[in-house]
Image: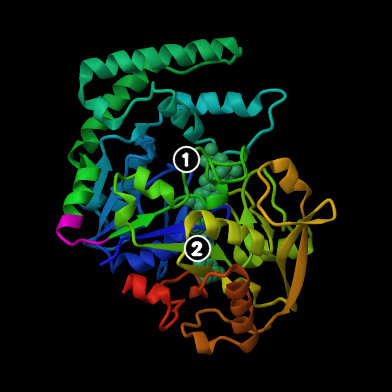
Amino acid sequence: MSNVIVLGAQWGDEGKGKVVDLLAERFDIVARYQGGHNAGHTVFIGEKKFVLKLIPSGILRPGVEAVIGNGVVIDLAALLDEIAALESHGIDATKQLRISNRAHVIFPFHRLIEKMSEARENRIPIGTTSRGIGPSYEDKTGRRGIRIADLYDPESFRDLYDTLAEDKKTLAATFNLHDTIDYAEIRAQHELYAEKIRPMVCDTAALLADAMARGKRILFEGAQGTMLDIDHGTYPFVTSSSASAGGASIGTGVPPTRIEGIIGVSKAYNTRVGSGPFPTESDDAAGDLLRREGNEFGAVTGRPRRCGWFDVPLLKYTAMVNGFDTLFIMKLDVLDCLEEIPVCVRYRLHSADVTEMPATYRALEAIEPVYENLPGWHTSTRGIARFDGLPTEARAYLKFLEERTGVEVGGVSTGPERNETIVRAGSKLERLIG
Ligand code: GDP
Ligand code: IMO
Ligand code: MG
């Protein structure tokens, strides 16, 4: 009985929400291990569309427990909004959801600091989601952050909060920022929020350990994607947490030895939101076509996503740092109308072959991708649910990705809905989710 991680192999929005929702019925618990409400995981169930930000996509499966792990940063107002939105669809999230007492809190002033940081002269803006994610993680690593457990120790919370607020006021003044924040009101609000979530708060590492001891299976849900990982991504154009596989252990307290499988989720092409290098970006008509066909607009901010081609060196890199057992290739149907499909097969830099992922964004910006063109299939693959039902060229395309990345393509998605999915018979994926 294996515990498995599902995470993004590119720059996010690969379709993790769909995969987690799909697989959740085979697991007892779905646990989020990092990020916050910067994530936007879209799940379609028939006519209904859900965009989950903080709450693991497993919540949509009755009977599955959803855990927000210690590695997540939580905006309590956003969390309560999300719970209310689910309630309006008849889902009582409070029954299934458990929240780590060690997760850090995002306060409204974190957004202020982020605004300041993004707007600073001589600083390259990252193009963040403006949710206060980075500043909250800064306070965490700066050892002055406030955790969910602190909210239940009123005296200590007031002291911690007032000290943190003083810090932020000083910072705002230093940068001449017009600071209209009512710090005392925010503190009082959080005392109320804390009561509302109290029944869901616990030591989730202990909860998961106990569940494993009883033979329960855990599915770990990554947010963002490996190339946005704070260590392994395109630094500094990254998010502030460990989106890669290692983060699952740190962000939940489940030992690495208890995680048996890692599923990488990748689009059949590539997208990115926000700034930063993107070697296979196609900022021309082809990119527009991908955006239109793939409806590539941010689930959280509505920003148009930058679009481009599948990047083999990038996938090999994310497979290396994560140890993917198998790949789920998403949105194959978006390529249906193309005559030819370019795939980047290697990188060149200053006329020489590049064998390792460059460490600096400057080098990555200078990369010259080398493409091979594969024939398109010009027919609809939408909704095809059997691998041998795919057109020959589509199968050849997937085989090419598999051979060049060195990772099995175990799953293929041909539409946003649950049933528009292929799990290949005899694949590692099939065995992992068994
Ligand atoms: P996530 O952040 O990784 O969960 O991905 P997002 O939800 O931000 O973006 C993926 C989008 O693609 C969502 O709108 C999904 O409904 C949609 N989607 C997922 N799989 C497919 C697919 O195979 N085909 C199409 N056309 N859309 C898909
Ligand atoms: P999901 O889980 C795509 C990007 C932002 C920005 C950078 C830093 O839906 O795949 P942040 O607000 O995290 O400090 O922004 O990371 N980013 C995402 N891009 N999908 C996401 O989440 C993202 N979460 C953050 O656009 O470039
Ligand atoms: Mg998303």
* Residue at image location 27% in from the left, 56% down from the top: 91
* Residue at image location 16% in from the left, 56% down from the top: 213
Q: How many marks?
A: 2
Ligand 2 closer than 8 Å to label 1 CB: yes
The magenta segment: 212-217
Judging depth in this view, the residue of 266 and 110 nearest the camera is: 266
Q: Secondary structure at mark 2?
A: strand
**Residue 398 falls in which quadrant of the image?**
bottom right
Specify the quadrant that holds the C terminus: bottom left
In three-dimensional space, the C-alpha distance between marks 1 and 2, rounded to whole angstroms, equals 18 Å
- Could one spot residue 3 in this view of the protein? yes
Q: Is residue 191 left or right of residue 420?
A: left
Q: Which mark is residue 241?
A: 1
Residue 43: image location, x then y, percent: 42, 62
Q: Kindly identify the amino acid type of the residue bearing the numbered disc 1.
A: Ser
Q: Kindly identify the amino acid type of the residue bearing the numbered disc 2.
A: Val
Q: Which mark is residue 265?
A: 2
Up-down: is 76 above or below 206? above
Residue 214: image location, x then y, percent: 14, 59
Residue 347: image location, x then y, percent: 74, 58
Ligand 1 closer than 8 Å to label 2 CB: yes
Judging depth in this view, the residue of 140 and 131 nearest the camera is: 140
**Residue 205 falls in which quadrant of the image?**
top left
Q: Secondary structure at mark 1?
A: loop
Pointers 1 and 2 in contact (C-beta within 8 Å): no
* Residue at image location 68% in from the left, 58% down from the top: 307
